[in-house]
Amino acid sequence: MKELFLKRQSCRNYKVQKVGEKLLNELIETASLAPSARNTQPWKLYAVTKDQVVIDGVREGVQPDGANKFADNVNDFIVIVEQKPWYLLDEKERGKHSDFVATDIGIFTAHLVLTAEKMGLSTCILGRMNKEVVKKAIGLTGEEVVSLVIAVGYKQDDDILRVKTRKQGKDLVEYL
């Protein structure tokens, strides 16, 4: 696992090459094994890969103010949209449980990007975006909340693995 964690990085240097529906489906099926509070899986995914107009719209949405220029070469995206879990909708259950939606989406996203790396795909988690542009691109008009967009593709052959600079474990934990 440590080797996989060291190898996976946010790609910002993509080949102009489609991943395609079959491989995206395999990726999503595997990542969907991620745990979630009360197994609610509070997300809906939109695999953006077939329609060039939709791809271009999502690309526009993840490039506000000229950000994420590398997305010009990305032709496959996974849009994660929040879903309210049943236990927050059920009147009898409301108030008994915390809202774990953001945590669950984070766990799913980690599973997704690590699975992609294991499959030979590169990813970048995109949080900076114009969510309304992304919603419009994928055809959402209601109260749905776009949580994240994941760029999925193949890294350029000359893309180098960056050295990871992280806090040391001893600086992150206090044993009691």
Image (cartoon, rainbow, N blue to C red):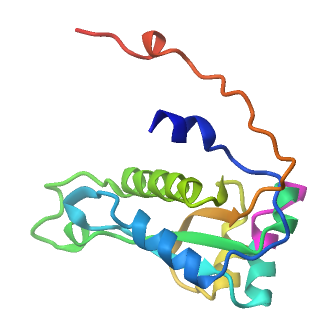
- Residue 62 among magenta residues: yes
Q: Is residue 131 left or right of residue 12?
A: left
Nearest the eye: 129 or 172: 172
Q: Is residue 8 left or right of residue 87?
A: right
Residue at left offset 53%, top offset 84% = 142
* Residue that sits furthest to the left in the current view: 92
Quadrant assignment for the C terminus? top left
- Residue 60 among magenta residues: yes
Nearest the eye: 80 or 32: 32
Find residue 6 and report its image quarter: top right
Q: Position of residue 144 (x, y in %)?
A: 50, 76
Q: Position of residue 60 (x, y in %)?
A: 82, 71
Quadrant assignment for the N terminus? top left
Query: Magenta stretch mostly in which secondary structure?
Result: helix
Q: Is residue 96 left or right of residue 43?
A: left
> Where does the magenta region start and end?
59-67
Residue at left offset 75%, top offset 33% = 162
Residue at left offset 50%, top offset 57% = 115
Residue at left offset 9%, top offset 69% = 92
In this rendering, is residue 174 above or below 3? above
